Image (tube, rainbow, N blue to C red):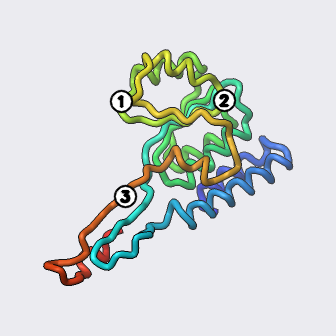
Amino acid sequence: MAPAVGALLDAAGAEVDAAEADWLQRAAASDERAWIDEFGAVSDKSGLGVERNLFRYRPVAVDVRIAEDAAVVDGIRVLAAALRSGSPFTVSAPALPSRVVEALRAHGVTVKHESDAVWAKRYAKAANSWQRVRLVGGDASALFEELGGSPDVAVWSHAVTGAGRVEMLPFLHEQAVSITNHRFGNPTTLADGVI
């Protein structure tokens, strides 16, 4: 488990019951497996000698909104996935436990306390093209209305899950890279260091 995730789960320990703490630990383990097996690995399924076709994931900035009706454990779950991804993210919530806020700020995460309505209005004013939002609880339609139906903001508002493969996706950008791996028909090692 990544140190930042461990610090977050330790900070959240007093805020959740034993069953929720166990679920968070299993979810963090799922994140770690997803990172090792897929998100943190570069793969080339084609296996061509004269061309490299690399598939990889890169961090992308995300705004995490934990809505007024969201359970604390769901918010912490999403924050653990965000920390494991290594992506830059901000957090907006009506309230978060002080120890959780301290753990997030220790890792450079900006945390704002605001209501759903205030957040939606502020976000709509500041939204730039191609931004991402992970909405925990709440109503995505209110955000869509504030954005005027703009398709430039990707909103993940699905129910929170313990599956790392699902929860880490909003924080990562898929990237395919194709590189010619020959020079005048002769194989070359020039692109070997590119990942």
Q: In this view, does 46 lie above or below 27?
A: below
Question: Residue beneath label 2, please?
Answer: 137
Tell me how far mark 2 sits from mark 3, CA to CA.
Answer: 32 Å
Frontmost residue, 168 versus 178: 178
Provide residue 51's location: percent of width, then percent of height: 29, 72
Quadrant housing residue 16: top right
Residue bearing mark 1: 128
Give the vertical position of 31 relative to 74 (above or below).
below
Query: Residue at horizontal 63%, vertical 36%?
Result: 158
The residue drawn where x is 19% and y is 83% is 186
Secondary structure beneath disc 3? strand
* Other residues around mark 1 within 10 Å, as few (<14) / some (14–19) / many (≥20): few
Q: In the figure, is residue 117 to the left or right of 62?
A: right
Query: In which image quadrant can residue 147 be found?
Result: top left
Total number of numbered discs in the rendering = 3
**Residue at the limit of the structure toward the left, as seen here:** 184
Q: Where does label 3 land, which residue?
A: 176
Towards the viewer: 43 or 185: 185
- Along the viewing direction, whichever of 111 and 118 lies nearer the viewer: 118
Is residue 21 in view from this perspective?
A: yes
Residue at point 53% right, 63% down?
Answer: 38
Q: Are discs 2 and 1 less than 8 Å apart at CB?
A: no
Q: Where is residue 88 in the image (x, y as percent from the top left)?
A: 46, 46
Determine the CA span between mark 1 and mark 3: 24 Å
Q: In this view, does 137 lie to the left or right of 36?
A: right
Which structural element holds mark 1?
loop
Q: Can residue 103 be seen in this view?
A: no
Disc 2 marks a residue whose amino acid type is Gly
Whole-angstrom CA distance, mark 2 to mark 1, is: 23 Å
**Residue type at mark 3?**
Ala
Between disc 2 and disc 3, whose residue precedes? 2
Mark 3 surroundings: few (<14), some (14-19) or many (≥20) residues within 10 A: few
